[in-house]
Amino acid sequence: MGQTGGRRILVTGALGQIGMELLEALSARYGRDSIIATDIRETDKLENLGIKFHKLDVLDKVELENLIKDFEVNEVYHLAALLSASGEKNPELCWKINMDGLVNICELSREYKFRIFAPSSIAVFGSDVRGVASQNSPLNPATIYGITKVSGELLAEYYHATHDVDIRGLRYPGLISWKVMPGGGTTDYAVEIFHAAVSGEKYTCFVNEKTTLPMMYMDDAIRATIELMEAPSEKLTVRGGYNLDCLSFTAEELYSAIKQSIPTFECDFKPDHRQEYADSWPDSTDGTKAKIDWGYRIKYDLKSMCSVMIKSLRQDVQ
Ligand SMILES: NC(=O)c1ccc[n+]([C@@H]2O[C@H](COP(=O)([O-])OP(=O)(O)OC[C@H]3O[C@@H](n4cnc5c(N)ncnc54)[C@H](O)[C@@H]3O)[C@@H](O)[C@H]2O)c1
């Protein structure tokens, strides 16, 4: 497999917040014929993009194997998962999808030798890590979602070390994007607030004004994903999940930044059960290892992220 050529890519959970944007980026870089998108939900949205779609539950290992064989897959972006807020409502299902799905992918990679991207999350950290989390900060999550992500990181390290599986991962921060609404995570407020602001509606934020979490604009996350997957295997010293440098702002600072462009926008703060998950996570993450190992650098700051979000949503509404 060359840097861009020869790829046969399967994406699981492709209809989610990250998947839909990743599909566009992968298709621009490697060609749409090299991709097969899958999700447990049905869609006809991908027809316009000319990307093949197959309905697939990642827990169905037989169907997964058939697709991998038939399409001669050599790279899997495994995005199917239940996120933090949805996971907490149904811990058993969260464990099943996040863990059994990943084991299915890793086991098939042992046989078919494809490269795997399996994202982790800042939810691996718990309340014993305050301020900035480093790569080696303790991993004591308080949510079932975080527990699946720590276990997923350990599985990735295990399959790499013991079974030579080429698996790679990032600890994504909360991702801010405008094309697809997020799927039940705790950082969803940082996306919903933009939709309300651009539609001229008041927003009630479900975390308090002082809540500070690691965040990133989607373009930076997609670029990180593709750069990591193209990095030479021997450079990588982490397989479970690299920390990334990120944005870090309070919910109030985000509100003020949006108000700079939309002065009439109003937001109040009524924390719900998600405040507890947010409080258990660090304010920011230190991505030094990703910088050293494969040269990752974040591009968007709070100002440029707000500006592109507002501009894109305004165009989308028209
Ligand atoms: N979006 C973020 O801010 C963020 C932050 C940290 C980590 N992540 C991780 O990135 C990955 C993708 O996240 P996302 O934000 O795109 O999530 P999402 O909820 O928007 O999308 C997940 C997709 O998985 C699909 N899915 C659920 N169960 C499935 C199953 N059994 N089989 C096949 N598909 C199934 C859903 O239909 C959905 O389209 C997840 O592993 C998530 O934990 C996301």
Image (cartoon, rainbow, N blue to C red):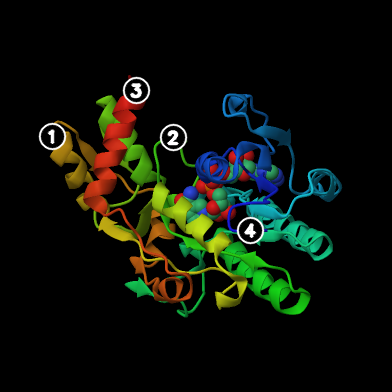
Residue placed under numbered mark 4 in the picture? 2
Between 247 and 237, the residue placed more toward the observer is: 237
Separation of marks 2 and 3 at Cα, in angstroms: 11 Å
Circles 1 and 4 in contact, beta carbons < 8 Å:
no
Separation of marks 2 and 1 at Cα, in angstroms: 24 Å
Between 295 and 139, the residue placed more toward the observer is: 295
Mark 2 / mark 4, whichever is N-terminal: 4
Can you tell which quarter of the image residue 203 is in? top left
Q: How far from the left and from the top, in percent, is residue 117?
A: 62, 58
Between 117 and 33, the residue placed more toward the observer is: 33
Nearest to viewer (mark 2 / mark 4): 4
Nearest to viewer (mark 1 / mark 4): 4
Residue placed under numbered mark 3 in the picture? 317
Q: How far from the left and from the top, in percent, is residue 259?
A: 16, 39
Separation of marks 2 and 4 at Cα, in angstroms: 30 Å
Circles 2 and 1 in contact, beta carbons < 8 Å:
no
**Residue 164 versus residue 253 in the image, above or below:** below
Q: Could you tell me the amino acid type at mark 1?
A: Pro
Can you tell which quarter of the image residue 289 is in? bottom left
Q: Quadrant of the C terminus?
A: top left
Question: Would residue 26 be visible to someone looking at this image?
Answer: yes
How many marks can you see?
Answer: 4
Q: Could you tell me the amino acid type at mark 2?
A: Lys
Mark 2 / mark 3, whichever is N-terminal: 2
**Residue 40 versus residue 99 in the image, above or below:** above
Q: Quadrant of the N terminus?
A: bottom right
Mark 1 / mark 4, whichever is N-terminal: 4
Residue placed under numbered mark 1 in the picture? 263
* Residue 179 tag number: 2
Residue at the (40%, 53%) spot, across then down: 220
Q: Could you tell me the amino acid type at mark 3?
A: Val
